[in-house]
Image (cartoon, grey):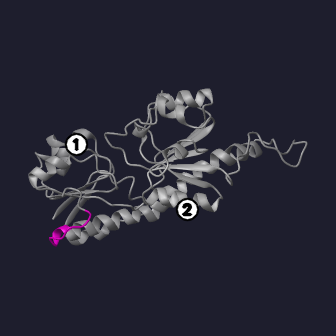
């Protein structure tokens, strides 16, 4: 079998693809420009992608293609309808990153509430050396115990975030169970998939319903936010802060309205990326392909 990985750069640092060798010939490209996708797939029978788009124009021209492995949970970058028409199997890696995303969610929450980076920089800049007191703080420190956490999207990740929040002494308000309590929570954290019905639903009207001075966390999908509305709420103080690991356009434009705001804490879509999670992706891709070759169904999303 001839196999191609089109964008392996974010998956394979420190890791190996050698477990694919038993299937045949594998070619790994760290990155593939849009204009080279069709050429690089060529006559391959199996292709693996992370974020690269496989649309009708590409899929219909790759006559040998029988299998698409998505190296992620989300698969909206693959045209499933065309794959069904052409008899191309599509598999994903479900629920691999639960622990990592939940951990990063709280990394953002704790950075906003405890301001570790700000105070570390202050010490490194010499401000503690000249302090009149044994301690100081340059911004308010927020105690999580007794605060409420609203969770939108109560799947594996949402539940894990809720467990961690309870360990901090927080009250959990699940959106699907009590919308008003969730919206009015001290911190609102998004863990839902992006669908046609919820794109940019965190907008001016939604934010107006939120508690004044609330904190917004998004480690799900960037398109869930109307970014200009969120930026305005951060500027006005309606939202005290936001912690984001995802943006609608990635990488973002330098002019993105959120990037320059001091009360918006942004990481580069990295919450899924611990080495252990990336190894799960590789192992899962091998297992999916192995099942396909054996005529079995594992993590098929095209059925």
Q: To which residue does mark 2 refer?
A: 163
For disc 2, the neighbor class at 10 Å (few under 14, some 14 to 19, many from 20) is some
Circle nearer the N terminus (1, 2): 1
Q: What is the chief secondary structure element of the magenta stretch?
A: loop
Q: Which mark is residue 225?
A: none
Q: Could you say where residue 206 lies in the image, as x and y percent from the top left?
A: 48, 34
Which residue is disc 1 drawn over?
36
- Element type at mark 2: helix
User: In the depicted view, which residue is nearer to us: 174 or 273?
Assistant: 174
Classify residue 95 as left or right of residue 110: left
In percent of width and height, residue 1 lies at 15, 65
Residue found 38% across the figure and 48% down from its top:
193
Judged left or right of residue 227, residue 30 is left
- Where on the picture, by quarter, is residue 241? top right
Tell us which disc is closer to us: 1 or 2: 2
Q: Where is residue 256 in the image (x, y as percent from the top left)?
A: 48, 30
Decide if residue 105 is in sight here.
Answer: yes
Along the viewing direction, whichever of 104 and 129 lies nearer the viewer: 104
Q: In which quarter of the image is residue 14?
A: bottom left
The residue lying at 18 percent from left, 70 percent from top is 296
What is the magenta range?
292-299
Q: As drawn, is 292 to the left or to the right of 268?
A: left
């Amino acid at each position: 079998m001839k196999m191609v990985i089109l964008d392996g750069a974010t998956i394979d640092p420190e890791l190996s693809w050698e477990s694919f060798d038993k299937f045949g010939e594998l070619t790994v490209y760290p990155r593939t420009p849009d204009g080279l996708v069709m050429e690089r797939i060529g006559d391959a029978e199996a292709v693996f992608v992370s974020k690269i788009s496989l649309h009708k124009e590409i899929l219909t021209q790759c006559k040998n293609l029988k299998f698409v492995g998505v190296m992620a949970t989300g698969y909206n970058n693959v045209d499933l309808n065309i794959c069904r028409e052409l008899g191309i199997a599509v598999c994903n890696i479900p629920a691999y990153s639960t622990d990592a995303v939940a951990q990063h969610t709280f990394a953002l929450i704790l950075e906003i509430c405890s301001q570790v980076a700000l105070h570390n920089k202050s010490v490194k800049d010499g401000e503690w050396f000249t302090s009149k007191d044994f301690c100081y703080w340059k911004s308010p420190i927020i105690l999580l115990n007794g605060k409420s956490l609203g969770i939108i999207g109560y799947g594996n990740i949402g539940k894990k975030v809720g467990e961690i929040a309870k360990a901090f002494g927080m009250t959990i308000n699940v959106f699907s169970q009590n919308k008003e309590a969730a919206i009015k929570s001290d911190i609102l954290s998004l863990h839902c998939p992006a669908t046609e019905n919820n794109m940019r639903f965190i907008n001016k009207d939604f934010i107006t319903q939120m508690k004044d001075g609330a904190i917004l966390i998004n480690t799900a999908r960037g398109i869930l936010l109307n970014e200009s509305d969120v930026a305005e709420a951060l500027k006005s103080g309606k939202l005290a802060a936001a912690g984001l690991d995802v943006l609608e356009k990635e990488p973002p434009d330098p002019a993105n309205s959120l990037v320059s705001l001091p009360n918006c804490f942004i990481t580069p879509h990295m919450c899924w990326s611990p080495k252990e999670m990336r190894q799960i992706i590789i192992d899962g891709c091998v297992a999916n392909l192995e099942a396909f070759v054996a005529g079995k169904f594992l993590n098929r999303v095209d059925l």
